[in-house]
Every structure is written in C-alpha cells, then in structure tokens.
C-alpha cells in the first residue's frame, strides 16, 4: 500500500523545549548501591537489618574469622550510624561486594577508607583477592585512639569480577564505614558514580533528571530518623537524611525491599544533574502514602515539618552560602547554587482529595517563599479511570502548573493512543509524562514508543517533559521490567528502548512542522509484545497473590516468600486483549510468562486475581 505524507513547510507547529526529554532515576532494581553509586563494599557500615529484608543481618555480605561482632552501643561513630564492628586481635572480616564480587581492572586505582577506634593501637591489614590469588599489594594502617578516618590506595594487578576484600587486625579494634571506590568515577568525583552507567545516562543528553524515585519517595513512615520515633526504618525518602558526610547519613529500608545507604543522596543527584546538563527535578513526599499503601497522614505538625523541609530543600539548592542550607551545600563543596526551577510534590497519589488538600499547602508555602519555582502535581497511577479523572479535575480547578502522568502499557496501547494529547486542554495544566514504557525490551517495543514520542512532540505545546521508566536494572536483582539500562558488577548495556530514547533525546527539534498522512498504516501479522497487567500488592499488606485464568489454571502466583518488596508481575480483574501473547523481554524468565506465544490473533483472557490480605 502506498501512503502519502503531506508536509507544509510554511506552517509551524508546537515549539519543543530543549528540556523535553529527560531521565527518571529511581533506586529500584538495586540501581543505587551496587549500581550507579560506585562503592564496591556492600553493607559497609554494618547497618543491614531484617527490617530492610528478611534475609539481612548486620553481617550480611561479610564473612568473619576469629572474633567479629556487630555492636550497637554508645561507642558508635555517629548517632545516625548505629552499628559498628568490634574485631578481636588476630581476627578478620571479608566482604563479598555486589553480584559476583568486586570488579577491578588491571592497572586501575582503588581508594580504600575506614573509620577505626582502638585504645591499644592496632595494625590493620587490607587485602584484595579472588579465588586465583591476590589482586593488589596488601596495604597496612597503624590505627590508634578515638574514631579516626584512615585511607589507603591500591592498584589492581589483575582484572577480576569476583574480588573479595579482607580487613584484618592484630589487636582489638572498632571499625566502621569500610569502603572501596574506584578512583575512576564519573567525572572523577569522590564518593562518585560508576563511570560506565553514568556515561550511558549522560549520552542521552537528558533535559532533566527526575529523582530520587517514584514509590521509593512517598511510601513508608513519614517520621524522622530519630530516637523519639524508635530509629524508624522504612521511612519515606527524606532528603535531609541523605546529605552531609556519608558516615553521618542514616541508612533506610527501601520500599523496593533492600537497604539503601544514602551514600548517593541529594547532593550527589544535584551534582549529577549539573554534570549532565540536566535540569534537576526532585520529588518530595506529600504525606499521602501511595503505591498500594494508600493512607493519608493526619498529623498537622508532621505536615508542617515536611513543608518546611521542602522549603529548606529549595534553599539547599538555590540559597546563598550565607543561608542555613546554602551553607551546607557550600560545605559539601558547591558554593554555587544548583539552579532549581521545578519540584514535584507527591507521586502517583491514589487518594486525590486527600492529596490535594496537602498539595495545596505545600504549593502555597513554596510560592510564598520561592515564587519562581514550578510546583508539579500528579494524576495518580492510571492512564484513565475514576481516580485519574478526579485527579485531573482537581488539578484543573486548582490551576496547577504541571501534572505528572504515568503509564506502563502494551505496545499496542501506545500505537492506539497516538492521539492522546491532541485533545488536551491548552488552557489547563501542562503535562509531565514522568514515567512510561511499553511492556518489553524488544525492538517492537522501542518502535511503539518511538511512534508515541512523535505524538508527544506534535503536542509539545502541552506535553512539556517526558521520561522513560525505570532507568536502571541490576540483572541479578530485577524487580521491575522492562528497564532502559541493564548492568552487572562490571558491564552495562542499553536496551533497544535506550537506543530509541537516545535517538530522540540527542536530536530534539526546535519546532514541529505540521504534516498529514493519507492513511494510517495497519500492522498485520504476528506481533510480539507484552501483556500489561498490573496492580499493587505489596508484601507489607498481602500474604500471597494469585492470578488464574477462566478455567482456574494458575498463571502467576507470588507468596512473597523470597521477601519481594513489590509484586509487579501481573494482576487485575476483567479481560484483556493479548496478541501473540508472549511476554517478551531482554531478560526472559518463566515466572513472567502469562500466556505462551503462538497465536497471532487477538484473544480475550478472563483473569481472576486473588490476594490474601495479611491478618491485622
Ligand atoms: O517506575 C517504577 C514505579 O512505577 C515507580 O516507583 C512508580 O512511581 C510507578 O508505579
């Protein structure tokens, strides 16, 4: 079939902002520790806790020899860094790193540091090796006195991806924050980012960096990390926990079911945005807990504190060095302001009324103190439906500047919804498409996204920002797929979707030239795509979840026994159309196969979901 495309160069369409395409970074799939954050030692401060993950202990990823006890007493290094290691004379501990172990490259430098307290004085020996032998000449520290930071540096004599690091002492010593970083981080920064991953993100030329996450931000307790609240774990992402010296940052139990060290924190995110030329776009919790934990926090004092924290965040980013929080930024090494212009309050809020009551208070306080800042709201977790409609109604009534929409759907959905924004109200709020992906990492998925992105550009007068999600996945800790960039401890690779994003992101046009096609090409033949069903069922609220077909055959089940932080495979009720229903992705696994490939025709699947709620 021949199609004609008419282009009229005398007419101009929407202008496309340089910041149109950006990245959404979330610490999901172990994207931070063992991922973008270049630290090679896992559980460096002995803070792993069963509250973070059922399998954790304070000695997780450490092997001990001799006397090695983790203690939590007043002799600690810092109030917010609760545990430390007591190592007996003639004893040692060995860290196994992330994934298969420490990845080191022959000839490269590695910077080691630890904090030690030892009354008697001790000789501490540090060595790197793997099953084949030594990976660097051992280093030695003479430690004496109260808590002091000691440093060493190593040059790797061999390349390995299975390295281990052993720390031994001849006399009793208290140790904490045992750390090893490659010197060669992104832009050579101390406490920096893994170079290959950061470079892949930078190669996208992101217009903005949305951070530090979606569900990671607005879930859990909104209390502070302090004694009065029982040294809360499972807290929402509270930015003040994540700045200052790394040994003074409390760790947290991540919504996605693991410990987050906060070594990669707000300062590092702002720096990364600056280094990549991206506009920083932080998301703060709105005190309505989302992502399946739907609960509005009814505590005016707590709300006031979070609003004040948000004002302080803006001061941290933009304030002069003479201001309280601007001074903290300067003390960390960045006297120049970061130039924050946008901030998002809340993520995927499922309780629109409750959210809006709180959002408006945040916005009023921000606008009163920082009138130049754009405060972004959201439309909940769906691409349509009653919650979505209600949220949009409230957004419009409140004259919100910009609304964040999220959706993860089949490639077919993206093709069928190319006209989604053509009818959006040009006098209403602007759109931030903060998270989207077609469900798979195949070329077909990337093409469906590309087709959809042309519609975003056609509507660039109303769609102002867009980012694919999620960005990163450690291949040994995948909780959500598809993802844009995959990695293990030594390698990383971009998906087809990554290459497609890069194509668009590094070739952002200035304005759209209106065009019209004589017809819409019809796709025929077998199409591989993904079945996109999702709901929220978290291990916090449910004992097990099961999806069955009309005959009662189990298609998917999850009893959370592995301690999954989040169940994302499939759920929902009703029927869905599935074409050639293979769940195709770059990292195929049987547990994600809903229906098998083979039938190229459309079919309806009646699926049932049974979720057993935890008692109490
Ligand atoms: O991108 C993964 C998750 O998807 C985000 O945390 C959440 O905002 C969305 O539901």
Image: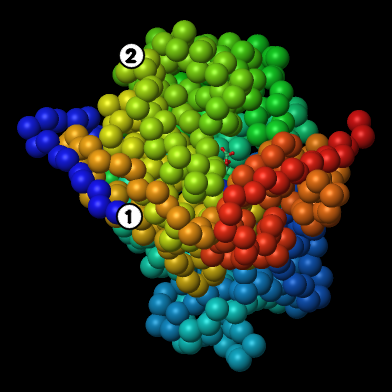
Residue 219 horizontal/vertical position (percent): 66, 33
Count all numbered tags in the image, as a single digit: 2
Question: At x 17% / y 40%, what residue is drawn?
Answer: 6
User: Along the horizontal axis of the image, is 207 left or right of 584?
Assistant: left
Nearest the camera: 518 or 350? Answer: 518
Using the image, determine if residue 405 lies above or below residue 425.
below
Viewer can see residue 40: no
Quadrant showing the C terminus: top right
The residue depicted at 61 percent of the width and 84 percent of the height is: 130
Name the residue: 42% across, 75% down: 109
- In the rendered image, the vertical position of residue 360 relative to residue 462, given as above or below: above
Q: Quadrant of the N terminus?
A: bottom left
- In this view, the residue farthest toward the front is 1
Q: Residue tagged by mark 2?
A: 427
Mark 1 or mark 2: whose residue is earlier in sequence: 2
Q: Is residue 190 above or below residue 536?
A: below
The percent position of residue 71, horizontal first and vertical second, equals 79, 54
Q: Disc 1 on helix, strand or loop?
A: helix
Tell whether circle 2 marks a residue whose Cβ is less than 8 angstroms from ligand 1. Answer: no
């Amino acid at each position: 079939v021949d199609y004609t495309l008419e282009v009229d160069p005398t007419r101009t369409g929407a202008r496309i902002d340089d910041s149109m395409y950006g990245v959404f970074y979330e610490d999901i799939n172990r994207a931070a520790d063992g991922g973008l954050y270049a630290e090679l030692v896992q559980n460096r401060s002995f803070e792993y806790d069963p509250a973070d993950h059922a399998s954790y202990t304070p000695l997780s990823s450490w092997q001990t020899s001799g006397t090695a006890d983790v203690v939590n007493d007043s002799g600690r290094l810092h109030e917010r860094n609760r545990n430390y290691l007591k190592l007996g004379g003639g004893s040692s501990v060995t860290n196994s790193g992330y994934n298969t172990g420490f990845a080191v490259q022959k000839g490269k430098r590695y910077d080691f540091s630890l904090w030690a307290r030892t009354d008697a004085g001790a000789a501490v020996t540090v060595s790197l090796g793997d099953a084949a032998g030594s990976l660097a000449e051992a280093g030695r520290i003479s430690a004496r006195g109260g808590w002091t930071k000691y440093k060493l540096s190593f040059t790797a004599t061999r390349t390995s991806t299975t390295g281990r690091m052993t720390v031994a002492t001849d006399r009793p010593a208290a140790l904490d924050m045992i750390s090893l970083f490659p010197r060669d981080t992104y832009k050579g920064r101390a406490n920096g980012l893994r170079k290959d991953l950061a470079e892949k993100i930078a190669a996208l030329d992101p217009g903005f960096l949305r951070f530090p996450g979606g569900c990671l931000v607005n879930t859990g307790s909104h209390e502070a990390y302090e004694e009065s609240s029982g040294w809360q774990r499972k807290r929402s992402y509270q930015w003040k926990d994540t700045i200052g010296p790394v040994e003074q940052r409390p760790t947290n139990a991540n919504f996605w079911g693991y410990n987050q060290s906060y070594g990669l924190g707000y300062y590092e995110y702002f720096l990364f945005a600056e280094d990549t030329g991206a506009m920083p776009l932080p998301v703060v919790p709105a005190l309505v807990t989302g992502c399946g934990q739907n609960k509005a926090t009814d505590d005016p004092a707590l709300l006031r504190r979070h609003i004040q924290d948000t004002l302080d965040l803006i001061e941290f980013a933009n304030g002069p060095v003479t201001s309280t929080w601007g001074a903290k930024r300067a003390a960390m090494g960045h006297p120049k302001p970061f130039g924050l212009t946008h901030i998002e309050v809340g993520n995927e809020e499922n309780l629109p009324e409750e959210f809006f009551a709180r959002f408006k208070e945040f916005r009023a306080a921000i606008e009163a103190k920082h009138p130049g800042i754009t405060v972004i709201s959201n439309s909940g977790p769906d691409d349509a439906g009653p919650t979505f409609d209600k949220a949009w109604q409230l957004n419009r009534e409140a004259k919100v500047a910009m609304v964040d929409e999220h959706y993860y759907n089949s490639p077919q959905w993206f093709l069928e919804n190319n006209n989604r924004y053509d009818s959006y109200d040009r006098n209403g709020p602007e759109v931030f498409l903060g998270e989207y992906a077609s469900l798979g990492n195949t070329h077909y998925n990337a093409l469906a996204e590309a087709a959809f992105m042309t519609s975003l550009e056609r509507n660039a007068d109303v769609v102002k920002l867009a980012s694919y999600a999620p960005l990163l996945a450690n291949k040994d800790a995948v909780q959500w797929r598809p993802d844009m960039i995959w990695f293990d401890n030594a390698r990383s690779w971009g998906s087809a979707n990554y290459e497609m994003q890069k194509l668009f992101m590094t070739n952002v046009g200035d304005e759209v030239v209106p065009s019209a096609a004589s017809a819409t090409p019809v796709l025929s033949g077998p199409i591989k795509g993904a079945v996109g069903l999702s709901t929220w069922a978290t291990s916090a609220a449910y004992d097990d979840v099961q999806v069955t077909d009309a005959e009662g055959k189990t298609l998917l089940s999850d009893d959370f026994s592995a301690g999954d932080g989040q169940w994302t495979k499939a759920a929902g009720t009703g029927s869905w159309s599935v074409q050639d229903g293979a769940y195709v992705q770059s990292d195929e696994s049987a547990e994600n196969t809903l229906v098998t490939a083979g039938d190229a025709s459309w079919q309806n699947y009646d699926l049932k979901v049974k979720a057993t709620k935890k008692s109490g």
